[in-house]
Image: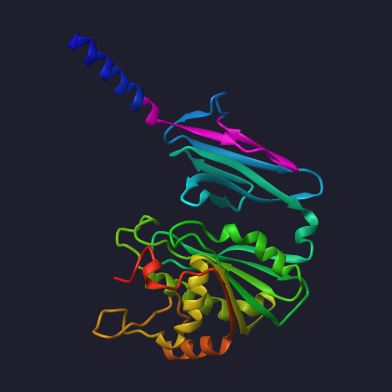
Amino acid sequence: MKKHLLFSAILLFSVGLSAQNKFKVIPDEARNGSYTITPQLPKDGMLKAGTELTLKATPAVGYIFDSGYYSLPGQWGPMYYEQSTSTFKVKVDKDMNVGVCFVPQSEEANLNVVQDVVYATPGVKPLKYDVYSPKGKQKLPCIVIIHGGGWSSNTESVMRGFARELANSGKYVVFNIDYRWIDKLDGDKVPTQLHQIVEDVYGALVHIIENAAKYGGDSSKLLLTGDSAGGHLSASAANFIERIGDRGFAKKQGVFEFMPTYMPKGKTVAQVREELAKAIKAVAPSYGVFRPEMLTYRFK
């Protein structure tokens, strides 16, 4: 009897271990186009952990590729991780959905779209932004979008639709930025702290001021917005400008200064601080987290 129970326990453990080594991939239906997955998914969708899938999107006539993605269950529902190229790879290490999105060609007919402009690399993840600019226009105010996700998920890709719609008004050049995730979620050995994420936002803004004109933007007119964590970061960037400096954050008693992740050559911190103070004209945060007791991660 004991041997039988021991054999059953070992069998159940082996089955459980085998199940953990496989994950289910569900392909979402594509509209206005199609996509292929290589290698082909089995009927039950179960794949060995570590399998690398290649997705290739093909738009229907009159449509263009917008984004590819994989989505994972998250604390606020599905969390989407978008890809900016029509052929992209996804590593299977969790249960996930995959898919692609297409939009009418007319959505970007009046826009110049530049994606993945790298502004700094303070850690493992290159920090970047997208630019949506109306064709043939100059000296437009610049809207800067900062995505949400609890400082711990999402990238600028989740705000591309919003950025496109704002730019399609013909009144703004829209910059859609990314930043580091908190703690070690980007794969960095040293944890990223919340004040460093604010420094990433300042770095993006400094880089945008330096390059706005090439996209038809007026570098002296920045309008900041963001939702949730992005709301917090947009408000922080607008309100902490006088604390931009090079003396460090909490390295000395009573000193809390933000050093932008990107600094232009030939400019001092004081010059950058003055430029930002003059350039930021308005901020419109959406349900940002502002009370300290509500923050999941706090300054250390």
Percent across and percent down for residue 38 are: 57, 33
The residue at 48%/72% (across/down) is 233
Q: How many marks?
A: 0
Instruction: Tell me the quarter of the image containing the N terminus.
Output: top left
Q: How is the image coloured?
A: rainbow
Instruction: Tell me the quarter of the image containing the C terminus.
Output: bottom left
Q: Is residue 75 above or below residue 244?
A: above
Instruction: Assess whether residue 21 is covered by the magenta stretch.
Output: yes
Instruction: Assess whether residue 7 is covered by the magenta stretch.
Output: no
In the displayed structure image, the side of residue 140 where residue 96 appears, left or right: left
The residue at 55%/44% (across/down) is 70
Q: Which residue appears farthest toward the left when viewing the image?
A: 2
The residue at 63%/60% (across/down) is 160
Percent across and percent down for residue 148 are: 52, 63
Percent across and percent down for residue 251 are: 26, 79
Toward the viewer: 125 or 281? Answer: 281
Which image quadrant for residue 246? Answer: bottom left
Q: Which residue appears farthest toward the top when viewing the image?
A: 1
In the displayed structure image, the side of residue 241 where residue 69 appears, left or right: right
Which image quadrant for residue 197? Answer: bottom left
Toward the viewer: 136 or 11? Answer: 11
Toward the viewer: 238 or 38? Answer: 238
Magenta residues (range): 18-39
Q: Is residue 160 above or below residue 23?
A: below
Percent across and percent down for residue 133 are: 70, 70
